[in-house]
Amino acid sequence: MKIRHLSMMTCAAIVFAGPALANEELLKLEKDPSQWVMPTGDYSDHRYSTLKQITAANVKELRPVWTFSTGVLRGHEGGPLIIGDVMYVHTPFPNKVFALDLNDSGKIIWSYEPKQDPNVIGVMCCDTVNRGVAYGDGMIFLDQADATLVALDAKTGKLVWSQKNGDASKGETGTSAPFVVKDKVLVGISGGEFGVQGRLTAYDMKTGKLAWKAYSEGPDDQILFDPEKTTNLGKPVGKNSSLATWQGDQWKTGGGATWGWYSYDPELNLIYYGSGNPSTWNPSQRPGDNKWSMTIFARNPDTGVAKWVYQMTPHDEWDYDGINEMILADIPVKGKPTKALVHFDRNGFGYTLDRTNGALLVAEKYDPAVNWATHVDMATGRPEVVSQYSTQAGGPDHNTKGVCPAALGSKDEQPAAFAPQTGLFYVPTNHVCMDYEPFKVSYTAGQPYVGATLSMFPPKGQTNLGNFIAWDAGTGKIVWSDPEPFSVWSGALATAGDVVFYGTLEGYLKAVDMKTGKELYKFKTPSGIIGNVTTYEHGGKQYIAILSGVGGWAGIGMAAGLNGDTDGLGAVGAYKSLSNYTQLGGVLTVFALP
C-alpha cells in the first residue's frame, strides 16, 4: 500500500511531524485537488474542487467504472476520503471502515469493524447513520454509534487509541464525522430526542486525552463562555446567559446536540458549528429561549472558549435543529467585501453573518413555502413568528396544521456547496410541511424524550418534496431552482468544470450546469442517495464517487421497516411512495469519462 501525499519530502515530514505540523499537513493537503482529505473537502466547507477534466460540455459522457458493496443496508450518509492512492469508505452501524487500493481496482487493504452493543440501535434517532471519517497525522478517526471515538493507523487499520465520548444507555450516540484542527480531534454528540446535554469535545490527536468540553447549555464554566468577552450580535452575553433561559434544572436534559458539520478559519483561529433542538419537542414544557440550543458557535479551538454566538430559533417549537454546515466564504454582501459565514438553517432561512464578530447581515427564506415566521428582525436577530403556526399557542394536544417547513427543515444535514467562479451556493433542499401535535412527556434516561406527533406532506397545491437551488448569499435570493419529486438528501459538489453534482432519494446521480441549473447528466445507482458527492484525480483522470444506500430520516420507513404515517417522527407518510423507486443497499459507485 502506498499513501501518496504532496511529495516524498512531505511524506517524510509527516512521519516525524508533531501536532502543530499535523495541522500544516491538512492545510497543504486540502489544496491538492487530486485528494479529498476532509469530509467537507476543506476547512471552509466549500465542497468545491478545482478539477475541471469533467465539464459542462462532456459530463454527459460520464460512466460508472467500478463499484464496491459495503455489505450494510441502512442509510449511507457522508462520503469517502481519498488520501494519496487510498480511499477510505465508512458505513452506518456497525460502522465498518474500509481502506481501498486505488492502484488495484479498489482492492481491500484493510477493514475495521468495531464490536458494539446492538442495543445502541434503539437509541439512534432517524436511522443508524454515520457521516464519515476524518484524517490527520497518519490516522483515521471514527465516531462510532456507541459514542466511542477511535483512532486507526491509516496504513494498517490497527487501533491506536480509543476514547469513550458518551453514554449510549442515556441516549448519547455518535453519528457525526470527527474534525481535525491543529493537534486536536473534535467530535460532537447526538441524542437530542433523548434529552442529552449537547456538547462539542476536543481530544488530543496523538493520545486521545481530553483537551476541553463545551456544552450547548448550562453555566458559563460548562459552556465555556466569558460573560464579558463572548458576544451575541455585538454585545457581551453576560453572566450565565444560558441558565436564565431555562426553568430550574431543565438545561441538564436540554438537548442542543452537535451532530452536524464543523468548519475552521485558520487566520481567525475560530471553529464554527451549530447546536440542535432543545428537549422536549413539547415547547410548553420548557419556557424560555432555551439558550444556547439552535445556535451558531464560534470558538477558539485551543481552549474551546466561545468568541461569539447567535441563536437562530429561540424557544424552538418545531424541531428546527441548527446543526447544518457553516460555509466560510469571502463574498460581497450588499456590495461590501465580507468574511462571511453562510448557513442554511432547518428553519428555512438562509443566514449570512460576518464570521469575525457574528454580525447578522442577511436572513432570508430559501424556500418560498416557509410560513412559520414572516421575517427575521435584523436588529434583534429574532424571527417574527406567525401565531397560527406556533405549536405552543394551542397548548398540548392541539394539532397545529400546515406548518412549513416540517421538522425535517428546508434543509437537513445534507451539505451545500460554494463555487467561487459564480459566487453562488448550491443547496439541496426539502419542500415539506407538517401537522404538529405536542403532548406531555416525562424524562427517563435512555428513553425517547420527544413529546410530539407529526405528519408530513408537500406544500398545499404542490407535489414535489424537494428542490435543488442556487443561492446568492450576498442578497438572500434564489437564482434558480430545480424541482425534485423527493427531498434532495445528498450533499452537493461544485467543480471548476462549471458542473454541480448531487444525488436523489430515488438513486440518481445528477449533474447540472452551475449557471443555469440545466440538467446535463443522470445515472441511477443501486439505491437511493443520501451520501455526499466526492471527486478526486488518480492516474491523470478525474473521478466522481458517491455512496448510495437509502435511509436517514427521509428514508427511515424503508431503513427501519416502519409503516405508520406518523412513524419515524412523521416522515414515513410523506415518503411512502419512495419504495416504488428504490430499495436498500450500500454501494459505492465511481464514475469517470471514457
Image: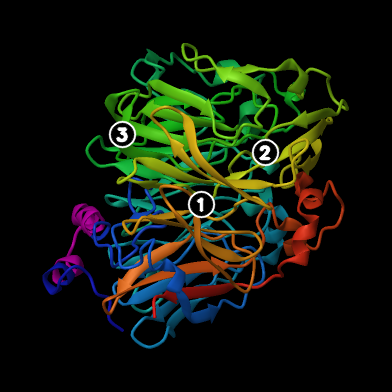
Residue bearing the label numbered 2: 195
The type of residue carrying mark 3 is Ile
Relative to 376, is 505 on the left or the right? right
Q: Is residue 392 visible?
A: no
Q: Residues within 10 Å of mark 1 (few under 14, many from 20)?
A: many
The type of residue carrying mark 2 is Gly
Is 544 in the magenta?
no
Using the image, determine if residue 325 lies above or below residue 339.
below
**Number of the front mark, 2 or 3:** 3
* Quadrant in which the N terminus appears: bottom left
Relative to 594, is 249 on the left or the right? right
Q: Residues within 10 Å of mark 3 (few under 14, many from 20)?
A: some
Q: Residue at x 58, y 68 (%)?
A: 548
Residue bearing the label numbered 3: 331
* Type of secondary structure dominating the magenta stretch: helix
Q: Assign a secondary structure to mark 1.
A: loop
The magenta segment is 12-28
Q: What is the number of callouts on the image?
A: 3
Residue bearing the label numbered 1: 165
Q: Residue at x 33, y 43 (%)?
A: 264
Mark positioned earlier in the residue sequence (1 or 2) = 1
Is 13 in the magenta?
yes
**Number of the front mark, 1 or 2:** 2
Residue 355 location (% of width, % of height): 34, 30
